[in-house]
Image: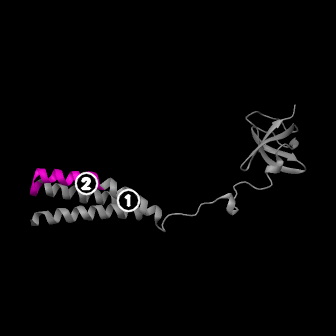
Amino acid sequence: MKSYIVPIALQLLGLAVIVMEIFVPSLGLLSVMAAGILLYSLYLVFNTISFSMGMVFLGVDILLIPVILILGFKALGASSLSLHKKLSSREGVSSQAPDLVSWKGKQGEAVTDLRPSGTVMIDGKRLDAVTDGEYMDAGTPVVVTLVSGNRIVVDKIE
């Protein structure tokens, strides 16, 4: 009966090291340690106890390791170690400057060559803008067709 104690203890230690790897960043060092501990435990079972008991241990490992990983990552998501704050516009967070939306439809002139990005002058204000891929010379009259995030897209006025 004593021959089972060391392999079972090593199996439990290996599973505990897997859980530690989830919570402690170790660049994979703990994963390598866990694999070594689990493999050594299997080696002991196959060589000192029996082949059939080794297969039982291997089957238990194949079932338990994915379960431990799933439960560990779920616990990590619920723990204080992970970011729970979601940034939303309802809370006042915006990735776009509020005044940029007002530029849509306004007309101006290209200050620099737009190839496809450059500077435009609209209502006396210099703005960074892009085209849909076409090249425009400086001085070309433009209109703002799209404001997406902090990106202002302009098109040539025909």
Instruction: Please say whether residue 50 is one of the residues in the magenta stretch.
Output: yes
Q: Residues within 10 Å of mark 1 (few under 14, many from 20)?
A: few
Residue 27 % position (x, y): 40, 59
Q: In the image, 2: left or right of 147?
A: left
Which residue is identified by label 2? 61
Mark 1 to mark 2 CA distance (whole Å): 15 Å
Q: Residues within 10 Å of mark 2 (few under 14, many from 20)?
A: some
Q: What residue is drawn where x is 44% and y is 63%?
A: 76
Q: Is the C terminus in the top left, top right, bottom left or bottom right quadrant? A: top right
Which residue is identified by label 1? 71
Mark 1 is on which residue type?
Leu
Q: Nearer the viewer, residue 84 or 10?
A: 84
Name the colouring of the figure.
one colour
Q: What residue is drawn where x is 9% and y is 57%?
A: 49
- Relative vertical location of residue 81 with respect to residue 153 in this rendering, above or below: below
Please give the count of numbered marks on the rendered protein. 2
Please tell me whether the stretch drawn in magenta is mainly helix, strand or loop.
Answer: helix
Q: What residue is drawn where x is 87% and y is 34%?
A: 157
Query: Which span is picked out in magenta?
Result: 47-64
